[in-house]
Image: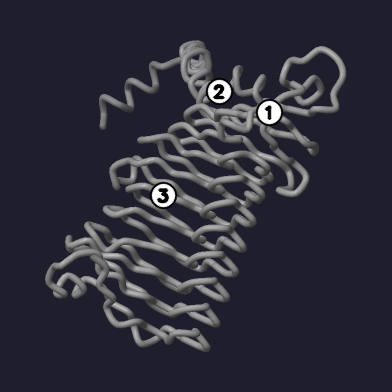
Amino acid sequence: MGQKTTFFKQFDKKQLAGSILLLAVFVLPFFSYAEDKKIYVDRNYIGTEKGTKNQPYKTIAKALENASDNTTVDVAKGTYRENIEIPSRVTVAGSENDEVIIEPRNDDKPVVKMKHKSQLDEVTVRKGGIGIRVSEGDSASISECIIKDNDKEGIKIESASVNEKHEVSITDNLIKNNGRNGILSEKRKLILKKNEIIDNDGDGIGIMPGSEAWISGNTIKDNDKSGMRINLDNSNISVRNNTYRDNKREGVEIDAFGNGGRIDVTRSKFYENDRYGIVLVQKGNFSRSIWNGLTIQNNNKFWKNSSGDISPIIRVN
């Protein structure tokens, strides 16, 4: 302690000022570079385009060409006719999801393609082949969007391992009137929360074997096939606090192909589906003990499902 006191007494004001200056030169730029950046887009702007608030780009694609890590592309009200690919660690955000509309220029490509750790917030994606595609092995976040009127899937998610690095989060979206499934996911780690998934021509949600998923607080209704179709095999899926209503087949179809897994269904509502509330489909000749990995809690509610609440195990060869 004595040595430290002597040192500070000898450290005069000029030395202190010099040290502060060095701190400003070397440390402050680090924090400056670490800050999030913004690029602005306004399709109605006329003039020199620099991506600033006063001189925005006219297309989202142009902004994305100039975006780097931790950039938010801030999109003004309007309809943007372009296919976009959101690079890694970049966010595309609108002000209101019904005011910023993205439609495809090329119907053979997804309207929006998302790369690793990209985000899409508060926009409408419509009238494409596939609305949004998350590429193989990449993670993504989609929130407060409207995904509708696409010819194929509203959201298609390609395969990846089930660790958090490859997680796809889909939260607070309206996904409706798509020509196939509202959401179709290959093997993945998924979070699906508080979405409305309505009136799609296929299943509302389809999830392939081997997935890990948390599915909570969603309303899934009026879909032309099942509200949700999931697989027991090698999966770990928690299904809670969802409503499945008025789907043209089952509220939920659970398939098993012969490998163990874990699915837990709790505190959900199954109303007025055209077949069962929940149907269990065994695809092959194997022991029914596989189904021990499925738990359907007593706190679920069933009402007026045409074929019954929960089916027996239905074997399909």
* Quarter location, residue 63: top right
Q: Mark 1 packing: few (<14 Cα in 10 Å), some, or many (20+)?
A: some
Foreground label between 2 and 1: 1
| Percent x, y of residue 41 | 74, 27
42 vs 5, nearest the viewer: 42
* Quarter location, residue 277: bottom left
Q: Mark 3 packing: few (<14 Cα in 10 Å), some, or many (20+)?
A: many
The residue positioned 51% from the left and 68% from the top of the image is: 217
Query: In this rendering, is residue 137 above or below 237?
Result: above
Residue underneath mark 1: 105
Left or right: residue 311 versus residue 293 is right
Quarter the N terminus occupies: top left
Q: Earlier in the sequence, mark 2 or mark 1?
A: 2
Given the image, on which type of amino acid does mark 1 rest? Arg
| Percent x, y of residue 307 | 44, 84
Left or right: residue 129 versus residue 284 is right
- Measure the alpha-carbon separation of dots 2 and 1: 37 Å
Q: Are marks 3 and 2 in contact (CB under 8 Å)?
A: no
Foreground label between 1 and 3: 1
Residue underneath mark 2: 32
Q: Are marks 2 and 1 in contact (CB under 8 Å)?
A: no
Q: Mark 2 packing: few (<14 Cα in 10 Å), some, or many (20+)?
A: few
Check residue 178 in the rendering and tell me which mark sits there, or answer none. Answer: none
